[in-house]
Amino acid sequence: MKNILNKISIKKNEKFKKKLKEQNIFTDINKNIEYIKKVYESEINTGIIFREFDINYNNKLYKGCIVFIESLSDTEGINNFILKPLMINDIFIQNKLDEAILGTLLLQFDIKNENSFSSIIDKINSGFSVLFVDTLDSVFVIETKKYEHRGIESPKNEISLKGSQESFVESIKSNVSILRRLINNENLVLEQIVVGKRSKTTCMIGYISNIANPKIVNEVRRRMQNISVDFLLDSGQLEHLIEDHPFLTEPQILSTERPDKVASHLTEGRVCIIVNNTPYVLVVPFTFWDFFHSADDYNLKFQYANLLRLVRIIAYVCSLFLPALYIAITNYHVDLLPTDLLFSIAAIKEGIPFPLIVEILIMEISFELIREASARMPGSVGSSLGIVGAVLVGQATVDANLVSPILILVISLTGISSFATPNYSLGLSFRILRFAYIFLASISGLLGIALGIVIHLIILCGSYTFNIPYFASFGEYQKKPFRDGIVLFPSWLNSFRPPFLKTLDNTKSEHISRKWI
């Protein structure tokens, strides 16, 4: 019975607040204060400050009240630049009362007039202060925001040996300032969009107006404006809401903490999405091959970068197919092995009671458990746990004749290869797909692996990300060569932006950029 009554009272309170937000400001300040107190339930809700005072205007006292959230606003600035000028000074001006107050407060803050409760409440929730004055049918909304946030630090998850050593932070203003400093151009546009019916989360769509394809920009804007959720707290949630294929394991949107990567992609014609209160920025559209690139590729000589890309592709193949190939060859295609190696594997497997698929699942699951446990533990403890756990589990399983030593080597190489992928989300997708290929190999050997590859490629080739083919830049004819796909050419030979983006300006440098020669 109590639960039913509570639900009824909550619904009534919600209806009251909804009706209240549609109400305009009253000229009676006491009614305004009473309404705001009801909205915020000030009797039990702490941190909502109502500071009432008197304003002396032409020898007549007018009641005033400033409302703000203590933890979101600059209380020192409110005291020094709002309350003191209005409470201490006597205002002797022939102008109207609202004009006189506005002239008094213009010394320090950005001020706007509002006359509806809905906009006022949204502003208070964002850290603004609202000044009510008796007899006035509008209020002064004063920007006094002051958020506590950490300073700019080095990237923790996308480490670069030779690149920039600063990362995004949770403050959207700091992130915007970093981008504007990196892209020192007046054509950098940052559009503000509010997402979330209740959270009113501030988001920014960033692009370079004379480079980015307007169709891509409009598509990003359309998706952002048509999101219907109560709360948006993180860029990861937004990624789920705007991606094209939710059931595709591969990532379709880049999520990065590196400002230099975002700036580089913006200059290519892509679009970024900045979400307040999160240190990760989204970049769209992003193709499959783009996820193999890292920030160091463009800071090193192209020979070194291509070597590293080759290593990543080899790591991709190993992390995805190595256990499946081991199952397929040892169970179905033993004639592919040299005779000595075949006898060695047979001798090692003697006495092991489980079939090969069970051995691999035991080691794969153990490896995943160790990796997840070490990631959740504190830094120094996590690294120690990962090393000790892997050694102990591997040695114990071999001594107990549960798995063969050669399988330990296969799983170790697979795990190391999965760490070589430059994008965390792409590495997670490999870990999921690896199990699918393991089961296909256990059913029909190399034929099962080949069938899985064909189905996988058909799905990827038929996928799109923001109306761009997911496998764009691979296997398509290009009149103007884009030399940054699988192989990276020197920057002085790479004069064109990605053709699949269809940018307004396709050329990013002159054909002969090294004019000093």
Image: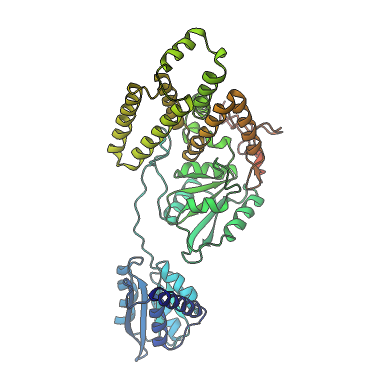
Instruction: Identify the residue at image location x=42%, y=48%.
Output: 168
**Image coords of residue 464 (percent x, y):** 64, 44
Q: Quadrant of residue 398?
A: top left
Q: Quadrant of the N terminus?
A: bottom left
Instruction: Identify the residue at image location x=56%, y=13%.
Output: 336
Q: Residue furthest bottom?
A: 60
**Image coords of residue 54 (percent x, y):** 32, 85
Instruction: Identify the residue at image location x=57%, y=17%.
Output: 333
| Residue in the foreground of this view, choosing between 489 and 16 | 16
Instruction: Identify the residue at image location x=41%, y=77%.
Output: 5
> Above or below — where is 145 with respect to 340?
below
Q: Is residue 346 something that shows in the picture?
A: yes
| Residue in the foreground of this view, choosing between 54 and 37 | 37
Q: Quadrant of residue 388?
A: top left
> Above or below — where is 391 with respect to 373?
above
**Image coords of residue 68 (percent x, y):** 36, 72
Judged left or right of residue 340, residue 511 is: right
> Above or below — where is 28 with respect to 507?
below
> Above or below — where is 175 with respect to 457?
below
Q: Is residue 512 something that shows in the picture?
A: no
Q: Quadrant of the C terminus?
A: top right
Number of numbered tags placed on the structure image: 0
Judged left or right of residue 416, residue 53 is: left
Q: How is the image coloured?
A: rainbow
| Residue in the foreground of this view, choosing between 87 and 104 | 87
**Image coords of residue 202 (percent x, y):** 48, 60
